[in-house]
Amino acid sequence: MRTIDANLNRIGEGLRLLEDVARFKLNDRELSERLKKMRHELAADDITLKAKLLSQRDPGSDVGASIELPDELKRADLASIIIANSRRVEESLRVVEELSKLPEVELDSSRFKEARFALYEIEKTLVGRLIRHDKSTRIRGLYVIIDPQAIKGHDEGEVASQAIRGGAGVIQLRDKSHTRGEILQIAKMLKGVCDERGALFIVNDYPDIALASDADGVHLGQSDMPVPEARRILPIDKIIGYSTATLGEALGAEADGADYIAIGSIYPTTSKEGARPAGLGTLLQVRNRVSLPIVAIGGIDEGNVHEVVRAGADSVAVISAISRGDVEGTVRRLVERIDEETERTARSYR
């Protein structure tokens, strides 16, 4: 009974921590509900059993209470805390599961076995969401899309380097002209450039190339692989962006598990054939209904970028704006305008 009591306490404490991360850090209603339900279902709610457990509780004589290993005193990050507490709960579930098989213990061992296997999957989901959340919060400021056709023969790596020096935090490779093998080589090169300079690297259209190049994520369009399918083949730390042009599409992308969404075309553009108009009105609507980071795209330049930020975009994507000469200078001016409008908007809410 003393062992069961200690492990039930560990289960409740660990699940509460996981629940709070899902609730307050990730704002994930489904995960929060699952963890809360599991925590309540595994608690000893029978008053007779609870009394037996409490009667055996004796923390003062617990010889293990003062034993701490060095790696328990400090964690590298929140993901490490999630993993440590998930393992703690899983181990305690196994202890209670086994002891519940004894005839004198009035607990259903199958409940703890089912919870243990459920938590294996929850741990994977929670850690993946947390890592991707940290990446997706970096979808801010200027998002530069490198299209070999748009940059007219200039070296992709040099364009990326100039863009990052100018202040771009995200580089995306969008390549409709090369073979898949050629795109992979360009992607690997750009991944190296972005890693060296601390920028995120995203591959457009191709989850397999994103995977093979170790990109930070993939960006998908309405005619590409659905988000849930891409999620199945990508590691848990890869973010997925999704292109939308309507409020309904944006809400659907969020429900499907996208980590960020792009909205466009905000203004008329020649960078993409058949681009559907979205406009500032749609951007405002989506900002009021979707909690994901929003990237505005389509016809954005130095003259209108302030309007896009004011309408609620977290990030602004450009393609043709960087194909007109001085990439670093153009990017720096765009970043300055984004920062100025972001600060102006923030002051208006104070």
Image (cartoon, rainbow, N blue to C red):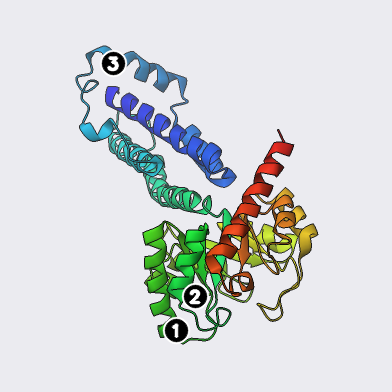
Q: Which residue is mark 3?
A: 59
Give residue 241's position: percent from left, percent from top. Answer: 56, 63
Q: Which residue is mark 1?
A: 180
Give residue 207's position: percent from left, percent from top. Answer: 47, 72
Disc 1, SS:
helix
Label 2: how many Cα within 10 Å (few below 14, some 14–19, many 20+): many
Report the Cα–Cα distance between label 3 and label 1: 63 Å
- The residue positioned farthest toward the right in the image shown: 281
How many dots with numbers? 3
Residue that appears at 76% across and 66% down: 278
Q: Report the front residue among 5 and 86.
A: 86
Q: Amino acid at mark 2?
A: Tyr
Query: Nearer the viewer's eye, disc 2 or disc 3?
Result: 2
Q: Of marks 2 and 1, which one's residue comes earlier in the chain? A: 1
Rendered-image quadrant of the C terminus = top right
Query: Could you tell me if the residues under marks 3 and 1 are in contact, i.e. CB atoms within 8 Å?
Result: no
Rendered-image quadrant of the N terminus = top left
Q: Report the front residue among 311 and 103.
A: 311
Q: Amino acid at mark 1?
A: Arg
Q: Which residue is mark 2?
A: 206
Label 1: how many Cα within 10 Å (few below 14, some 14–19, many 20+): some
Residue that appears at 28% across and 22% down: 2
Disc 2, SS:
loop
Say if residue 323 shows up in the picture: yes
Report the Cα–Cα distance between label 2 and label 3: 56 Å
Q: Report the front residue among 233 and 6.
A: 233
Say if residue 58 shows up in the picture: no
